[in-house]
Amino acid sequence: MNVHDSERISGLLEDAGYVRAGEDDDADLVVFNTCAIRENADNKLYGNLSHLAPVKSQRPGMQIAVGGCLAQKDKDTVIAKAPWVDVVFGTHNIGSLPALLDRARHNEEAQVEILDSLERFPSTLPAKRDSAYSGWVSVSVGCNNTCTFCIVPSLRGKEVDRRPGDVLAEVRALVDQGVVEVTLLGQNVNAYGMSFADPDQPRNRGAFAELLRACGDIEGLERVRFTSPHPAEFTDDVIEAMAETPNVCPQLHMPLQSGSDRILKAMRRSYRQTRFLGILDKVRAAMPHAAITTDIIVGFPGETEEDFQATLDVVERARFSSAFTFQYSPRPGTPAATMPDQVPADVVGERYQRLIALQERICLSENESLTGTEVELLVVADEGRKSAETRRMTGRARDGRLVHFAPGDTAGIRPGDVIHTVVTAAAPHHLIADAGVLSHRRTRAGDAHEQSRTPTTAPVGVGLGLPTIGPPVPTPATAAAPASAGCGSCG
Ligand code: 5AD
Ligand code: SF4
């Protein structure tokens, strides 16, 4: 979500006349799009700002803007801690950034604008996409759940869903520009359909499954993914739509958070261990080769060794192809932050190591089971250092796995193209395919990547029926460098 917001910020700034700064250029504008989901993401910002203070003092006219979840959380504190910042904008008013920059320049005074609710659906803003072959498309923003550890609802607000027609129009706009892979984005995609911004759009519990099926009809769209579902609301119609729609990838990110029913209850996550494992069984019955990934938190307040064993037990049985594991981080204002029995850091650290060791073993054995199989890869640009060291290239399999492959004699393979190869070896976090390429298909995405063309999407869809701030007066071409600090979303 955060990365995609950065694409919107880039698109807005380009529309306002800014030009992206080169890697080695000194930027006239630096924008931090921040994350506050865990404390370490939070702490990063102030370190980065301190590094920029001397740069700014050497460069008259340079501007620094801070947006995203941490800005929404810290508000005026950002300026109090780093008075050299020019603009602070929240998660609900990304669209105001160019106007705020102008105002800060004109008034020679820092501008802080944090709104309590969404001003414009971000998709009604232009976007400058990072990739020629893969694109994010938001289906919703915000979250109506109340997981007790999570700061997202207080910073991103209540869920607002986009009309299916608008989502599909944006997907088509990307595919028209060569994109072959789309990831539908929402904090809780299974709730999609119950909170449409448009009051005339009928509420529809089956809306997400219908959206997946509609993506299946888009000519040229080869891979559809989504993130993230929520185990409590994950319904069979979505599994059926996944299994029956050929371009929907056999991949599912299903956040577990904890394997202990007692801890899930304290987290206010309404599914239990049995239901979670039942979902995985159903998914695998419908899609035997689906790769299932997860998020797990270790050391939630009150977690006992027995609770943690329950997590290890689920992990052992679930056979996730990979897991994002986090040490519990108290977030201000969340119920869990003030719960008794916070788990000491050394206990959390020790459990965390045990969880990682188990999951690494599972990752490796799941990956090893793929040795000898044929995979279709969408070639990607420079993901993983492995490729540079060994002259291998890298691609993503349909199930989302990263595969480093040797191109052999096949010339002219470009990021964005599609190849077939055979897996020859496995590591916990990637596969190797060293026996050469079985087939290579040049794609329009590959052409676009080769010509350094990335898609832009014009504003799609209706706003929220709220007054909008008018388009900013274009400023003279100014170099801008977006910087992303932090991570993505959850479910
Ligand atoms: N502490 C640790 N991990 C957290 N996550 C969300 N909030 C916290 C927190 N307070 C994790 C969850 C979520 C992922 C994006 O981040 O596992 O799914
Ligand atoms: Fe919503 Fe996900 Fe946070 Fe729960 S963890 S409140 S589902 S964003």
Image (cartoon, grey):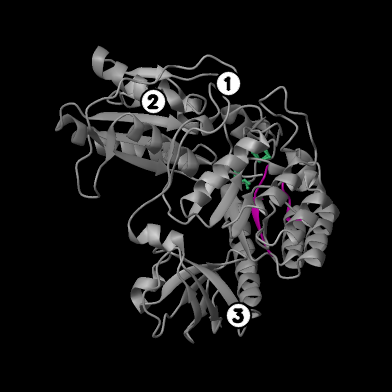
Q: Earlier in the sequence, mark 3 or mark 1?
A: 1
- 270 sits left or right of 20 in the view: right
Q: Looking at the picture, how far across and down is residue 472, in whole percent?
A: 35, 20
Which segment is the magenta one?
291-306
Label for residue 117? 1
Asked whether mark 3 and ligand 1 are closer than 8 Å, the reply comes as no
Sooner in the amino-acid sequence: mark 2 or mark 1: 2
**Disc 2, SS:** helix
Mark 1 close to ligand 2, CB under 8 Å: no
Q: Is residue 240 above or below residue 207?
A: below
Q: As rendered, which of 465 and 26 lies closer to the eye?
A: 465
Q: Which residue is mark 3?
A: 374
Residue 189 shows in this picture: yes
Which residue is located at x 70 percent, y 37 percent? 147
Where residue 338 sits, quadrant-wise, is top right
Residue 294 is a magenta residue: yes
